[in-house]
């Protein structure tokens, strides 16, 4: 099946920026776009990514999709539905088998942190397709020139289809890839264990050269973002592991905290349990 990127839209500025980013990313990947809008009743909705729903008629939705499609350089298929968000995305993933799911991340200063965190994690684990979140206002290069992969030194393994998708993305776009490791200030920031875990996962065969960058920071999420800034990264890769229910409820996971506070696009990649 030809390569495609599944892009979610609710017609907000953040969604429009994500669509523009996906359009620029599609060209070097030789990919088409699948633009998915889920129409839902405002009084019944509890999953809106930006915390609110603006009701639109069928005609307004059709016009909004048409205007956005007309501005794209990539070929596009438009999908709409009245459904549960997770179920609709799962159906689209089954139908089109996209390389990535792409969505915009609104400014979390004005939107609900809980909704941003819950939606991204729910979609990632429901589909197992790498999830690309594009923050509102980001100004990085597209396609990315420099990417950073955060690794904690512990072994991780990826599902075959997930590994294939990430390999295809990195091989085709060929960004300079740096593995970063965050250590407590009193500990060594030697990146050798982190680099070994990436190589053992199968990602090490993707690019001929893997750089390393150690960071010392008391808090791992802030350290990862510091590493991204210090390496001038245009893309941040996070290996997301399942956490306990308590951790998910209080959003203490490293991946969630990075998603909430990043200004650089984040590619969330699900690890096997």
Image (cartoon, grey):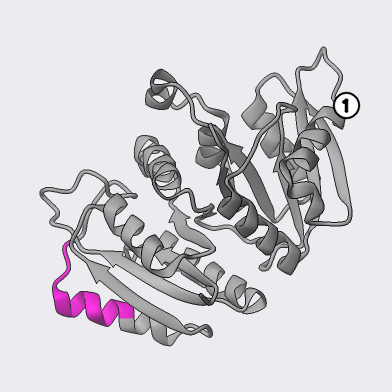
Give percent across and percent down for residue 27. Answer: 62, 79
Give percent across and percent down for residue 238. Answer: 62, 41
Q: Residue at x 34, y 58 (%)?
A: 89
Badge 1 marks a residue whose secondary structure is loop
Residue 266, visible in the rendered structure: no
Q: Residue furthest left?
A: 43
Q: Nearer the viewer, residue 100 or 116?
A: 100
In the rendered view, does 71 fall on the left or right side of 86?
right
Q: Residue at x 35, y 64 (%)?
A: 92
Q: Residue at x 57, y 30 (%)?
A: 254
Q: Which residues are magenta?
A: 55-65
| Residue 141 sits in quarter | bottom right
In the rendered view, does 250 fall on the left or right side of 213?
left
| Residue 258 sits in quarter | top right
| Residue 207 sits in quarter | bottom right
Above or below, 242 relative to 17: above
Q: Nearer the viewer, residue 157 or 240?
A: 157
In the rendered view, does 178 fall on the left or right side of 255?
right
Above or below, 236 relative to 184: below
Mark 1 lies on residue? 190
Query: Magenta stretch mostly in which secondary structure?
Result: helix
Give percent across and percent down for residue 264. Answer: 62, 51
Q: Residues within 10 Å of mark 1 (few under 14, many from 20)?
A: some
**Is residue 224 highlighted in magenta?**
no
In the rendered view, does 52 fall on the left or right side of 224?
left
Q: Residue furthest top?
A: 186
Q: Residue at x 31, y 50 (%)?
A: 86
**Is residue 58 highlighted in magenta?**
yes
């Amino acid at each position: 099946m030809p390569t495609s990127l599944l892009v979610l839209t609710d017609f907000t500025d953040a969604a429009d920026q994500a669509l523009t980013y996906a359009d620029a990313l599609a060209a070097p990947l030789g990919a088409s776009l699948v633009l998915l809008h889920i129409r839902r009743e405002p009084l019944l909705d509890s999953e809106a990514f930006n915390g609110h729903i603006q009701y639109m008629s069928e005609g307004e939705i059709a016009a909004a999709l048409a205007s956005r499609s007309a501005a794209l350089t990539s070929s596009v298929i438009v999908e709409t539905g009245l459904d549960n968000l997770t179920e609709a995305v799962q159906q689209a993933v089954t139908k089109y088998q996209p390389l990535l799911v792409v969505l915009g991340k609104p400014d979390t200063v004005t939107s609900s942190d809980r909704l941003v965190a819950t939606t991204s994690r729910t979609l990632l684990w429901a589909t197992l397709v790498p999830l690309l979140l594009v923050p509102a206002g980001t100004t990085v290069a597209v396609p990315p020139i420099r990417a950073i992969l955060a690794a904690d030194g512990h072994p991780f393994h990826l599902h075959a289809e997930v590994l294939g998708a990430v390999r295809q993305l990195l091989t085709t776009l060929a960004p300079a890839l740096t593995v970063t490791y965050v250590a407590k200030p009193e500990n060594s920031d030697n990146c050798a264990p982190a680099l070994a875990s990436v190589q053992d996962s199968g990602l090490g065969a993707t690019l001929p050269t893997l750089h390393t960058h150690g960071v010392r920071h008391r808090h791992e999420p802030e350290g990862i973002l510091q590493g991204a800034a210090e390496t001038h990264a245009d893309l941040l890769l996070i290996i997301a592991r399942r956490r306990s229910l308590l951790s998910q409820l209080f959003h203490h996971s490293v991946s969630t905290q990075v998603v909430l506070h990043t200004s650089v696009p984040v590619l969330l990649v699900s690890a096997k349990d």
